[in-house]
Amino acid sequence: MSISDDDRRGIVTIRENPHAVYTPAFLPHDHNPVYRMSGGGTLNWTCTTDVTMPERTGWAPGAVGYGWDEFTRVFPSEGGVIYAIKPDGTLSWYRHDGFADGSATWTGPAVVGRGWDQFTRVFAGAAGIVYAAKLDGTLLWFRHDGRRTGTFAWTGPRPVSRSWKFSIGGFEGR
């Protein structure tokens, strides 16, 4: 995903690959794992091997999960939480307990939502915030109050914008 911000126009552009999972920008700078999906639904974890001087070290990759190709969207949040949307709109919560060291240790899945197939873009912010964009340009704000344990508890939705413009591979908001 690439995110660009043009302060002169107040536009944020987010481009995503629907077959990939990315690290959110708000993770601590001393530890930024990156997730990506490869063929067959393998979820791979990658992180710098020396967080104090990443320019002098390589990246340590490893498979941490399988079967992720059953989802239409997969997106990370903080603390190792990863959300996944099934074709029927079921939103599942997973916590990658091994996000700090790349071990394949997980809690979940837990069903934490339904009807998420109605959104064209979904992405997480800090503190359990999840944004969901509808095709008509409405951007909705949700807070997952059950984010630490995977419980079905939410605040929202609240519309935060009605003028998000969509394009192939991305969208812009004002």
Image (cartoon, helix red, strand yellow):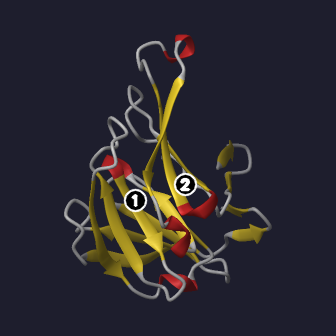
* Residue at the extreme right of the image, as rendered: 168
Give SS at disc 2. loop
* Residue 114, horizontal then vertical, whole percent: 40, 86
Name the kind of residue labelled 1 in the image: Ile
The quarter of the rendered structure image containing the C terminus is bottom right
| Residue visible at 61% across and 76% down in the picture | 162
Q: Is residue 152 above or below residue 141?
A: below
Alpha-carbon neighbours of circle 1 within 10 Å: few (<14), some, or many (≥20)? many
* Residue 155, horizontal then vertical, whole percent: 29, 75
| 72 relative position to 98: left or right | right
| Residue visible at 48% across and 82% down in the picture | 116
Along the viewing direction, whichever of 51 and 154 lies nearer the viewer: 51
| 31 relative position to 19: left or right | left
| Residue visible at 41% across and 65% down in the picture | 83
| Residue visible at 50% across and 89% down in the picture | 88
Q: Is residue 66 visible?
A: yes
Mark carried by residue 12: none
Mark carried by residue 82: 1
Tell me whether the residue at label 1 lies in contact with that at label 2, contact meaning CB atoms closer than 8 angstroms: yes
Along the viewing direction, whichever of 130 and 105 lies nearer the viewer: 105
Q: Is residue 51 above or below residue 73?
A: above
Mark positioned earlier in the residue sequence (1 or 2): 2
Residue underneath mark 2 = 21
Name the kind of residue labelled 2 in the image: Val
